[in-house]
Image (cartoon, helix red, strand yellow):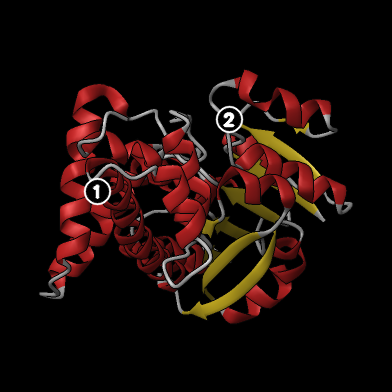
Amino acid sequence: MRIGFIGVGVMGGPMAKNLMACGHGVAVYTRTRKKAAEAVEAGAEWAGSVAECAKGAEAVITIVGFPKDVEEVYLGSGGLLDSAERGAVLIDMTTSRPDLAVRIAGEAARRGLSALDAPVSGGDAGAKAGTLAIMVGGDEGAFLRMRPVFEAMGKNVRYMGPAGSGQHTKMANQIAIAATISGVCECLSYARAVGLDPRAVVELISAGAASSWQLTTNAPKILDGNFSPAFYLKHFVKDLAIAEAEAGARELELPALNAALAKYRELEALGYGDAGIQALAKGYSGGW
């Protein structure tokens, strides 16, 4: 299948390479061309614009930074809704607003296109290994046609319902992460404050009921002083803000989400936006 891929950064680059490894022809576009260098070296065709990337593509995948970027790529002048081939499937894998996914799906249908919202979880490691969890909303028929495309990038692929459902599922995912990483940071701060060896604590409790991906993966990074991003803190702030707005619209109280978002916003204001989400530890006492 010929696939256009827009946004080949930390996540998109490995995902595009996995598509090529499965035999798909891939054209790539990103605003900063040097970010596409690895994908191009691996065999991807460079496209000079959104419209060029969509030309002749049966599917176009986007994974960009923020909802405003999604709007620009899809709804802007020369965007995908104007330039994609009739019958193509547009797949937005950005974590974005559910209402924007619904809007794009409606506009796509009116133009003879299909649109799926398909955010992912698994970080850069999952993108490289092709083991991402992919949560998909939109037309189920389009999902079934694209399932082999998704399976080239992920191992846990599920259709979640109509347009916006993929994004809502990702919000649930991010809410769970926010509460868990907060607990990990508090655990480490407490362990150090009472004189325990935090590393020994992590090794011990990782084998019990407290075990989680955040504990086994991000706690060691915190203890090593490694705050490099597998997922940018600034993007997590964006995700949690969307989740908070969606919860607020439904008068749903989510205090753990609210508390985590407040701390993450403080850290972003202090200049940690390009760090990984484990930099939340810097918002707690402990000398991290």
Mark 1: few/some/many CA within 10 Å (<14, 14-19, 20+): some
Foreground residue, 60 or 107?
60
Where is 51 relative to 271, above or below? Answer: below
Identified by mark 2, the residue type is Thr
Looking at the rendered image, the quarter that the C terminus falls into is: top left
Q: Identify the residue at image location x=48%, y=29%.
A: 228
- Residue 47 shows up from this direction: yes
- Of the two numbered discs 2 and 1 on the same chain, state the one appearing first in sequence: 2
Callout 2 environment at 10 Å: few (<14), some (14 to 19), or many (20+)?
many
Q: Identify the mark at residue 190; answer none if there is no mark.
A: 1
Camera-side residue: 135 or 125?
Answer: 125
Q: Looking at numbered disc 1 in the image, what kind of residue is underneath it?
A: Tyr
Instruction: Specify whether 288 is left or right of 118.
Output: left
Image x and y of residue 130, in percent: 72, 54
In the image, is 140 to the left or to the right of 223? right
Label 1 residue SS? helix
Q: Are marks 2 and 1 in contact (CB under 8 Å)?
A: no
Residue 12 point in image, percent of width and height: 62, 41
Quadrant of the image occupied by residue 133: bottom right
* Local SS, label 2: loop
How far apart, in angstroms, are the residues tagged by discs 2 and 1?
44 Å
Q: Nearer the viewer, residue 154 or 182?
A: 182
- Residue beneath the point at 50% across and 60% down: 206
Task: Using the rendered view, name the quadrant where residue 152 is placed.
Answer: bottom right
Looking at the image, the residue that sits furthest to the right is: 23
Q: Nearer the viewer, residue 209 or 115?
A: 209
Residue that mark 2 sits on: 30
Relative vertical location of residue 203 with respect to residue 159 in this rendering, above or below: above
- Is residue 192 depicted above or below 245 in this figure? above
Q: Residue at x 55, y 21 (%)?
A: 32
